Image (cartoon, rainbow, N blue to C red):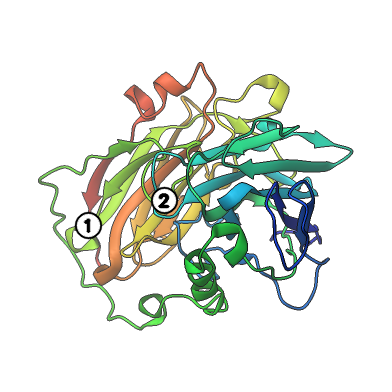
Amino acid sequence: MHRLKSIRLWLTIVLTGVTLAACTSSNTSSITVTTAPIGTNTAWVKDSTSALNIFLPDEDSIYWFDGYGTANGARTVLTGQVPTARYWSFTAYPIPQNSQRQHLHDTQIGQSEGRYTFTIAQKCTGVSGTCMAMGATNGGVLVMRLYVPVDIKAGKEISLDQATGNPAIGQTITTYRDQNGALPSALAQSYPPPAPVPVPVSNPAPVGGITYGTGPYANPDNIYEHMAYTTTRGNLVVTAKAPTYQADANPETNDLARTADQHPQVRYWSLCTTLKGRHTGDCLRDEQISIPPGPDIFTVIVSPTCPVVGYANCLLAGPEPLQSSLAYRNLLPSADFKPLAFTGPYRMTATYVARNS
């Protein structure tokens, strides 16, 4: 269970070098629209596997997102308390999405006295400190990701219309916010139990594909191996050599945790079932996975029900009509490990096994 701690998260939109007749007549003045401290209405939208469940969150991550704007000289300034988490990052996705996407993770963001600050602008010329240069885009969606975090609360609602030059991005964020954390209706429906599969269908053998943090609202710090599955063929069993990962304060089921100065191979890794519509099902993260003594090989079974006799690690497959793939995530692999990620023994091998009930 995540410990809960209130962290103030601020978003400031600064319009510089622009004359606004209603507010000022000087083109050298600045107008700052700032969020209030934590209040009753939050502009930041919470996205997790138990709230909203979009952008494929990990079960041990929390995403927060809002809009940003850079039109007509506007700059969006983010400042807040440094989160307590294994990993945290910000990604700015222009709308419509294009190659100007920018990303920063925790070690790339300027921090001082327990606080971080960075700026989003079309150009970073003359901007002090950490800055994302978005080029000729006017605004989009900003996503903050926290892995193995304490929870956070965010700031009060602000308007994005002036900063983006149009109401479209604000309307996009409002659409998500109005869902009030509700899960998609397909995830709340009841589905019939799956049929037994006494003879597994093993041909063709399941094979994973590798992706590098591309696609809509993907995290550029992640490398994934995605393996399509369906429990109509039986229960899926996967094995692979496990990488070392960065230790935190949570209990560990295996001995692969390493402190930062011991240079773990990845910051974090996990396995999650993903469902149609880009939703996350069930997850197990690095320190939760039981690994027997020996060459650090893990085995996980994907099944409609857990636990499964004979398997220490089990993931819920989700309803058969929604099943899509198993996602194996490596977050921030080290420079030495990145060429090895999902190759040789580190790549998943899989087969289907019988299911009697």
Residue 6 placement (x, y as % from top left): 81, 61
Local crowd size for mark 1, using a 10 Å CA cut-off: few (<14), some (14–19), many (≥20): some
In this view, which residue lies farthest toward the right?
A: 113
**On residue 22, which mark appears?**
none
Establish if 74 lies above or below 175: above
Residue 346, percent across and down?
39, 28
The kind of residue tagged 2 is Tyr
Query: What residue sits right under mark 1 in the picture?
Result: 354
The residue at 71%/34% (across/down) is 127
Q: Decide: few, some or many residues near mark 2? Use Cα within 10 Å; few <14, some 14-19, many ≥20.
A: few
How far apart are the two marked residues, 2 and 1, measured between alpha carbons? 13 Å
Q: In which quarter of the image is residue 82?
A: top right
User: In the drawing, does residue 117 fall left or right of residue 52?
Assistant: right
**Residue at image point 53% right, 40% down:** 134
- Is residue 223 visible to the viewer in this orientation of the structure? yes
Q: Could you tell me if residue 70 is visible in this image? A: no
Residue carrying label 2: 311
Q: Is residue 324 positioned above or below 78 on the image?
A: below
Using residue 209 as the reference point, say whether residue 27 is left or right of it.
right
**Pick the front one: 327 or 306:** 327
Q: Which of 76 and 18 is in front in this view?
A: 18
**356 left or right of 334?**
left
The quadrant holding residue 165 is bottom right
Corner quadrant of residue 354: bottom left
Image location (x, y in percent) of residue 237: 31, 47
Q: The C terminus lies in which quarter of the figure?
A: bottom left
Residue type, label 1:
Ala
Residue at image position (30%, 53%) is: 325
Q: Which of 323 and 159 is in front in this view?
A: 159
Q: What element carries label 1?
A: loop
Q: In which quarter of the image is the N terminus?
A: bottom right
Above/below status of 64 relative to 174: above
